[in-house]
Image (tube, rainbow, N blue to C red):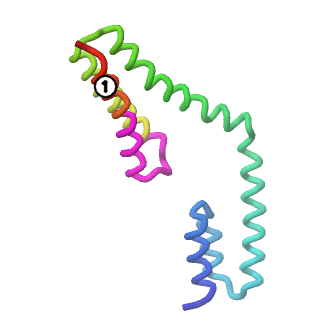
Amino acid sequence: MDVHYLLGKFLVLLDTSLPREFVMACLDCSNKSSLMDRAERMKAELGKRRVKWMTKKDTFFARLPLALAGGFALIAPMLIMTLHKSKLTSLLTTSFFVLAVAIMLSWFMKDASPKDIIGATAAYAAVLVVFVGTGGN
């Protein structure tokens, strides 16, 4: 086993957001100094890219629709179940909104693992099921 190969594997484990070209360059390096030079250049390039397209205003407006959707996903079913007090309405509302949230989470959480999406959906369903259990006729 080569030292550069092990270092490349370590870099992949350390930071999975590293570009593929950088990791491949680490694996192909012939000496340690060129590896460090490439690492510093890539780190500087990544820093420039992040500054270029991730300002505070941009990140706020990127998160705002998701925050509003999350608030809507909690308030809308509770309003429906409060205004129409029947067990059937509560169960149908809960089923529909849990399904809709599961689809939204799987669509927007591209970097999440399946267990994260299942956990978030289960937590959301638990909140609505508690509301079903306490309300309705």
Q: As drawn, is 104 to the left or to the right of 93?
A: right
- In which quarter of the view is residue 1 placed? bottom right
Q: x, y percentage for residue 97?
A: 35, 27
Q: x, y percentage for residue 15?
A: 60, 65
Q: Is residue 121 magenta?
A: yes
Q: Nearer the viewer, residue 122 or 42?
A: 122
Compared to residue 9, the image places residue 45 above or below, namely: above
The residue located at (57%, 63%) in the rendering is 16
Q: As drawn, is 41 to the left or to the right of 64?
A: right
Q: Nearer the viewer, residue 7 or 49?
A: 7
| Dominant secondary structure, magenta | helix
Q: Which residue is mark 1?
A: 94
Q: As drawn, is 63 to the left or to the right of 71?
A: right
Q: Which residues are magenta?
A: 106-124
Q: Quadrant of the C terminus?
A: top left
Q: Nearer the viewer, residue 19 or 75?
A: 75
Q: x, y percentage for residue 34?
A: 75, 81
Compared to residue 63, the image places residue 4 above or below, namely: below
- Residue situated furthest top in the rendering: 83
Give amino acid for label 1. Answer: Thr
Compared to residue 137, the image places residue 63 above or below, namely: below
Compared to residue 128, the image places residue 13 above or below, namely: below
Q: As drawn, is 69 to the left or to the right of 14?
A: left
Q: x, y percentage for residue 95?
A: 28, 28
Q: At numbered mark 1, what does the secondary structure look like: helix, strand or loop?
A: helix
The residue located at (72%, 44%) in the rendering is 53
- In which quarter of the view is residue 61 placed? top right
The residue located at (32%, 32%) in the rendering is 99
| Number of disc labels | 1
